[in-house]
Image (cartoon, rainbow, N blue to C red):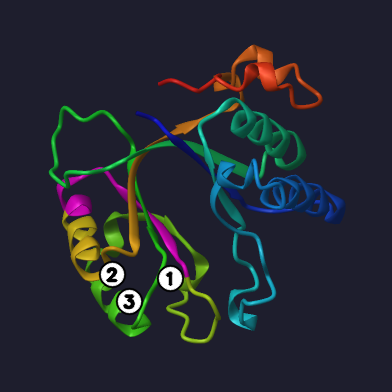
Amino acid sequence: MWDSIFVLIHHFHRPYKKKDVLYLIDSRLKDSRKKDLILFHDINIIDKCNACKEYQPWIILKNTGEGLFLIKKFIEKCEPWITTAIQENIYELKYSQEENFESIFVLITKINSREKLYELLNPYKDVIKTSDIRIKNQCLDCKNLTPWLIIENKPKGFEIAKVLNENFKPFIVLKKQNNIYKHNIPNEIKDLEKWNQKYGNKKIEI
């Protein structure tokens, strides 16, 4: 089941756009009824070192009506500097040509040794499509490292996903994902200016 959506913001072309996005996220996180809508996020530049200040903010939302409403708002405020992808948990790390998805998303929520992570990734750089800037920089200075990467759906991609899973479980999230676009959002959600609870059961289905 496609249960979550990854949002990657490449650039805020106007400062107030960032404030708008922060407000949309914080207002949900501070509401005890809604805080589980945002599964993971990193939009904080304060704990990034000088070499990693160009990091890209990201959010993972539940694939629900309100999650789609937030994605619609993010797209409106950030396009064309935004990427969105629908995700589904991976439970069996076994490559199959019949599995029709674009990439593997990996999020590591706790790391004891950054050096070990970078050492594991180095032989697989050719199948890493993109990643957190701290992985690209092999950073040892940033605080609160919870890096993500997107890996090609290839046998070698599954190989590094298995290596990472073995070394970092249970502090790792693995998902298959496909890119989605504005036209994938249901029309009822696209037409909303304010969130309406009656659309809570809406989802994107691929």
Residue behind mark 1: 135
Q: Residue at x 51, y 32 (%)?
A: 63
The residues tagged by marks 3 and 2 sit, at their Cα atoms, a distance apart of: 5 Å
- Residue 159 placement (x, y as % from top left): 16, 56
Mark 3 or mark 1, which is nearer the start of the sequence?
3
- Residue 191 placement (x, y as % from top left): 75, 16
Crowding at mark 3 (Cα within 10 Å: few <14, some 14-19, many 20+): some
Q: Residue at x 17, y 47 (%)?
A: 93
Q: Which of the 4 image quadrants contains residue 193?
A: top right
Crowding at mark 2 (Cα within 10 Å: few <14, some 14-19, many 20+): some
Q: Is residue 151 magenta?
A: yes
Residue behind mark 2: 121
Q: Quadrant of the N terminus?
A: top left
Which mark, by number, is residue 118? Answer: 3
Which mark, by number, is residue 74? Answer: none
Q: Say if 136 sits above or below 104 in the image.
A: below
Instruction: Say what amino acid the circle numbered 2 marks.
Output: Leu
Marks 3,2: beta carbons within 8 A: yes
Which secondary structure, mark 1? Answer: helix
Q: Which residues are magenta?
A: 146-158
Marks 2,1: beta carbons within 8 A: yes
Q: Nearer the viewer, residue 126 or 159?
A: 159
